[in-house]
Image (tube, rainbow, N blue to C red):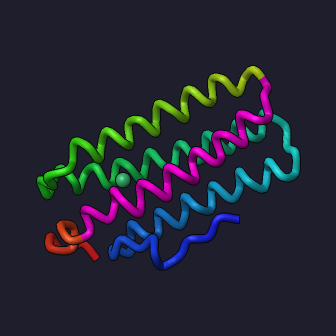
């Protein structure tokens, strides 16, 4: 079970809420894997994670650009890498390898940990100064 903790807070409630939702999607994936769900269901859940992540990235990217945040390009590049990685995993998953799903799950968790704790936190001050709460 992946748990959102205060250390993940970027100090902006609407963004923290989206991050919490991402954790919920990851837990759905973890549960489905534990229960040995069929690949079709797993693939569906991965698509849900992907869809939600994209909605979330769009929100961040909108503000990064609107507030002319200095590190925008690097930040957006990380989002792009994530999108590409997940879509290539999905394509490979069609071969039916279970280990691939575990690999993906840990990739997602590591990526989210790194991204929130090290990259998202960089915009906290800028976003707050521009009035986001
Ligand atoms: Fe981000």
Residue drawn where x is 33% and y is 54% of the image: 59
Per the image, is 120 magenta?
yes
* Residue 15 on image: x %, y %: 39, 66
Per the image, is 89 magenta?
no
Residue drawn where x is 21% and y is 67% of the image: 127
Q: Which of 114 and 132 is in front in this view?
A: 114
Q: Is residue 57 left or right of residue 91?
A: left
Residue drawn where x is 33% and y is 76% of the image: 11
* Residue 92 on image: x %, y %: 66, 23
Q: Is residue 131 above or below residue 108?
A: below
* Residue 27 on image: x %, y %: 68, 59
Q: Quadrant of residue 94?
A: top right
Q: In this view, does 74 lie above or below 59?
A: above
Report the magenta residues as a range.
96-124
Residue drawn where x is 44% and y is 45% of the image: 54
Q: Is residue 99 left or right of residue 48?
A: right
- Give the position of the C terminus as an image quadrant: bottom left
Main SS of residues in magenta? helix
* Residue 16 on image: x %, y %: 43, 70
Q: Which of 100 and 41 is in front in this view?
A: 100
């Amino acid at each position: 079970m992946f748990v959102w903790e205060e250390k993940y807070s970027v100090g902006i409630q609407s963004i923290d809420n989206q991050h919490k939702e991402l954790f919920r999607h990851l837990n759905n994936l973890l549960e489905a894997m534990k229960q040995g769900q069929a690949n079709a269901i797993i693939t569906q859940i991965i698509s849900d994670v992907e869809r939600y992540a994209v909605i979330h990235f769009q929100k961040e990217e909108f503000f990064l650009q609107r507030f002319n945040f200095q590190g925008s390009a690097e930040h957006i590049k990380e989002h792009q890498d994530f999108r590409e990685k997940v879509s290539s995993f999905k394509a490979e998953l069609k071969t039916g390898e279970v280990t691939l799903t575990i690999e993906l799950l840990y990739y997602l968790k590591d990526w989210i940990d790194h991204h929130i704790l090290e990259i998202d936190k960089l915009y906290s001050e800028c976003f707050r100064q521009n009035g986001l709460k």
